Image (spheres, rainbow, N blue to C red):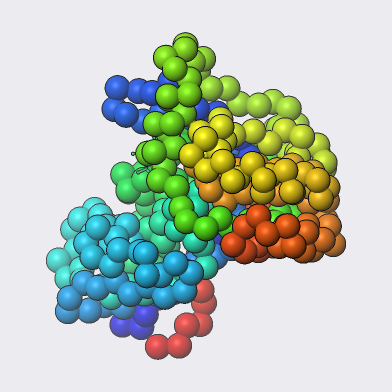
Amino acid sequence: MTPVTVRVPAKVNLQLSVGPRRDDGYHDLMTVFHSVSLFDEVTVWPADRASVRVTGQDASQVPTGRTNLAARAARALATAVKRRQSAVQIEIRKRIPIAAGLAGGSADAAATLVACNELWQAGLTQAELSEIAAGLGSDVPFALLGGTAIGQGRGERLTAALAAGTYHWVLAFATGGLSTPDVYAACDRLRDAAPVAPPELSTALMAALRSGDPAAVGLQLSNDLQPAAVSLRPDLRRALAAGEESGALGAIVSGSGPTCAFLAADARQAGELAVALTGAGVCRGVVRVQGPAPGAAVVPGEPG
Ligand code: C5P
């Protein structure tokens, strides 16, 4: 059997509205996911023993044992399709930083589902893969789908969003990561038991996305986790301010952070923003990306 390689994007949240903490510890969300052109690549081969190898960005910090989310994805798919010889060698080439609010681990899990479905010729549909994905993590189904989509429930119930145009972003990576559960816990603490309304979709954001006007979208970006992320990482305030002062149409913490995402008017302004953010010394690195990007997909023609 020849190996299968899948390319999978990172995401930002254009809206992340967080409802009250549920009895199961999760929070009901209303979110608008948007995939961006920062990709990890995952290759799977049949093997006698399961293994995970990680190279690239933050590779040394990714666990390579059974707990690795990609390894769990391969096992979950093998169970779902009742496959007996299910050991695979997984190689993850990372460009998405870990614990960054960009759903990199979820992306690798989604890529592994698509890759093993192809390797084993299991024939599961996108909807069937999405159900397995939801069991692995709240953001995994969206990494399968890509594009721009509304997420409800824990974030796993998806509806494609009507969005026009291409959006130019600069992502500013922070030194170190943030743990998603820690950020949700900080959000609960900041709310201090005040009543929290059920999260609602921003109709203004949806109208802006339909118009394809980045200036309109920039005004409507929102993230309920941002105060919590900034409370844990006060240095993010400087990064957000530097982007705003340099003319970003919108400046926001991505998901649970600490990556900050800046929306530019076009490719040229994204270049200027990237230079300004680097010069301001407010982050460990920047990358220019475009959204929406396609979800996890097999890379054709991989040599055997
Ligand atoms: O689903 P996932 O494992 O990616 O979530 C990681 C953690 O993020 C959860 O354990 C929970 O603490 C928090 N979370 C949440 N509400 C969500 C999604 C995630 O509280 N909707």
In-image side of 130 versus 46 (left or right): right
Specify the farthest residue to the bottom. 304
Tell me if I can see residue 33 in this picture.
no
User: Residue, x 56% and y 32% (percent of image)?
Assistant: 227
Give 259 or 15, whichever is nearer the viewer: 259
Residue 155's x, y, as percent? 46, 37
Q: Quadrant of the C terminus?
A: bottom left
Residue 204's x, y, as percent? 73, 27
Q: Total number of numbered labels?
A: 0
Residue 59's x, y, as percent? 40, 70
Residue 13's x, y, as percent? 58, 42
| Ligand 1 picture quarter | top left
Q: Quadrant of the N terminus?
A: bottom left
User: Residue, x 32% and y 57% (percent of image)?
Assistant: 69
In-image side of 291 versus 207 (left or right): left
In-image side of 16 versus 73 (left or right): right
